[in-house]
Image: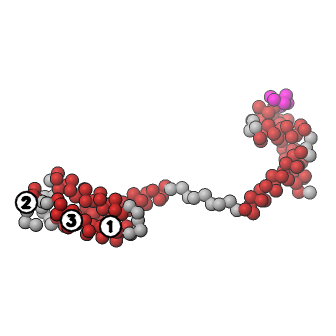
Amino acid sequence: MGKNKKEIDLEEIHTKYRPIVSFRVRKSLGSFTPDWEDVVNEIIINVIEKIKKGEFRGESSIGTFIYTITSRRIIDHIRQKSKVLKHAPEPVAYPDPHLQVENKERAELMTEAIQKLKPKYREVLYLYYYKELSREEVAQKLGITSRRVSERVNYSQKLLKKLITK
């Protein structure tokens, strides 16, 4: 350029090196990457800021200086994107319609079987599973021991298994 490092024409750098930086970024990230232009803008701004701060000492050509900044920013961008991808949750799969129908049929079968139980067994199951009360809380509500609650829950499960497998 023939100019002192303080007299570097920033407009000339933008005009001359932006197409080169754009080509390198598109080649590295892929032109299908929607934010490649943002990366190019960040690189050009970074180059201009570094030149203004005096970080370009003139030990290499301005092209080498820009090339180094470009390479580092591309690597940073790729690393940042791969971090995001590692921590991104997997998309939830669509529910299988056959599985939904089976679950609905199973729920209906279970409801019918529970209706066939004696009220004392239905009530224990309702409080323990539906209301999610502990065995001690169910015992207090029903005025029985927690051991008796356990017995009724287990017996109810056995009865339901018999009713469902008929």
Does 96 sit left or right of 44 as displayed? right
The type of residue carrying mark 3 is: Thr
Q: Position of residue 20 (x, y in %)?
A: 25, 69
**Residue sitting at x 18%, y 60%:** 11
- Report the disc number at residue 83: none
Residue at image mark 3 = 15
**Label 1 environment density (alpha carbons within 10 Å; few <14, some 14–19, many ≥20):** many
The type of residue carrying mark 2 is: Asn
Q: Nearer the viewer, residue 29 or 138?
A: 29
First in sequence: mark 3 or mark 1?
3
**Residue sitting at x 39%, y 57%:** 80
Q: CA distance from mark 3 to mark 2?
A: 19 Å
**Residue sitting at x 61%, y 58%:** 92
Q: Does the CB distance between marks 3 and 2 fall below 8 Å?
A: no
Q: Nearer the viewer, residue 74 or 41?
A: 41
Q: Say which element carries label 2.
A: loop
Does 81 sit left or right of 151 as displayed? left
**Residue sitting at x 36%, y 63%:** 36
Residue at image mark 1 = 25
Q: Which residues fall within the magenta stretch?
A: 140-145
**Label 2 environment density (alpha carbons within 10 Å; few <14, some 14–19, many ≥20):** few
Q: CA distance from mark 3 to mark 1?
A: 16 Å
Does 13 sit left or right of 23 as displayed? left
First in sequence: mark 3 or mark 2?
2
Q: Position of residue 100 (x, y in %)?
A: 74, 58
Q: Say which element carries label 3.
A: helix
The quadrant holding residue 75 is bottom left
Q: Does the CB distance between marks 2 and 1 fall below 8 Å?
A: no
